[in-house]
Amino acid sequence: MKNILIIGATGQIGSELTMKLRSLYPNGNVVAGYIAGAEPKGALLESGPAHIVDITNPLQIAEAVDKYQVDTIYNLAALLSAVAEAKPQLAWKIGVGGLYNTLEVAREKGCAVFTPSSIGSFGPSTPHVKTPQDTVQRPETIYGVTKVTGELLSDYYWNRFGVDTRSVRFPGLISYVAPPGGGTTDYAVDIYYSAVKGEEFKCPLKPGTFMDMMYMPDALRAAVEIMEADPARLRHRNSFNIASMSFDPEIIAAKIKEYVPGFKMSYELDPLRQGIADSWPDSLDDSCAREEWDWKPEFDLDAMTTDMLLNLRKKFGIQQPVVAEQA
Ligand code: AKB
């Protein structure tokens, strides 16, 4: 049976992944690790144990692992790409120093470790369309540098010490639950909020900026499935390309307009985010994940859009539009 610690359990991915893991394993076996100032609240707090775990403090990681006899760590602590550019030293301290602390505790105490990588681990010299699993990784952002370092360090701990490290490269993640903060792909979440509130959306990226995106339920399933995958089938570990949809601002806006006909979008470009997005792939080739652990996404742009609009309207108490019955 798994005893799981989630580091960064109150963040964008962590808050949903913790609840998903508690739906799959006994609640008491899934520990929400949080930092001071980001304490768990509501269902996250009430449904299972929580422990203070600052990833920059190896003693706190070890203490939580000992107290709850943890055998699997989900390491979700990171600064997203745009905010990392504003605080590169902190991004390194959390992304690389924190991962090193986690891997050392895992080596000493025999834990498996999941640490997400990202489409941000690629750079301008990477093939941009159907980016292969194994290819050039020369990112020009500190976020990307920490992600490539994390992939290499995690593979090193597997090859050198046998620490069971596994990872996926997340695309931009879209969810109606916890808002993202400081990412380059966040526009694809914010656009839905504007649409349901009846506001014009000011897009920070220009038309033609394609990036891979994924609906959160698929991303959570990927994080669980890679950790449950048969190790004998894995030729890769850190980290697998996964993909479900690729679009630019025009395509997502047109899809939203199908369901919210009055929706309006204009452009107000953010040069930092545009520069980062231009350096990232347009789309990933995820065939290795499909072959090695049967990865398969369930949501495309249409299915995601209907679910996002439905749930955001519920969240803000906005009446659902009446759909005319088919004759
Ligand atoms: C970001 O935009 O920084 C993240 C990512 C793609 O890793 N969402």
Image (cartoon, grey):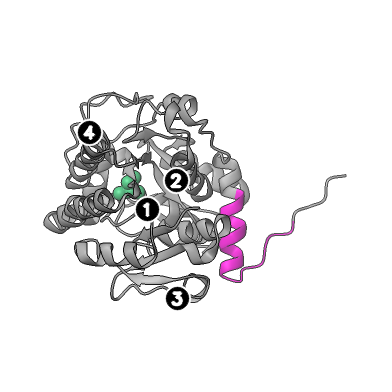
Residue range (magenta): 306-322
Res. 93 image quadrant: bottom left
Q: CA distance from mark 3 to mark 2?
A: 23 Å
Q: Amino acid at mark 2?
A: Ala
Label number found at residue 74: 1
Q: Amino acid at mark 1?
A: Tyr
- The mark nearer the N terminus, 1 or 3, is 3
Mark 2 Cβ and ligand 1 under 8 Å apart: no
Q: CA distance from mark 1 to mark 2?
A: 9 Å
Residue at horizontal 33 percent and vertical 61 percent from the top: 65
Can residue 260 be spotted in the picture? Answer: no
Q: Is residue 158 left or right of residue 57?
A: right
Label number found at residue 41: 3
Camera-nearest label, 2 or 4: 2
Q: CA distance from mark 4 to mark 1?
A: 26 Å
Residue at horizontal 19 percent and vertical 36 percent from the top: 139
What percent of the width, then of the height, locates residue 23?
57, 58
Q: CB atoms at circles 3 and 4 under 8 Å apart?
A: no
For mark 4, does the 10 Å Cα neighbourhood hold few (<14), some (14 to 19), or many (20 or more) residues? many
Q: CB atoms at circles 1 and 2 under 8 Å apart?
A: yes
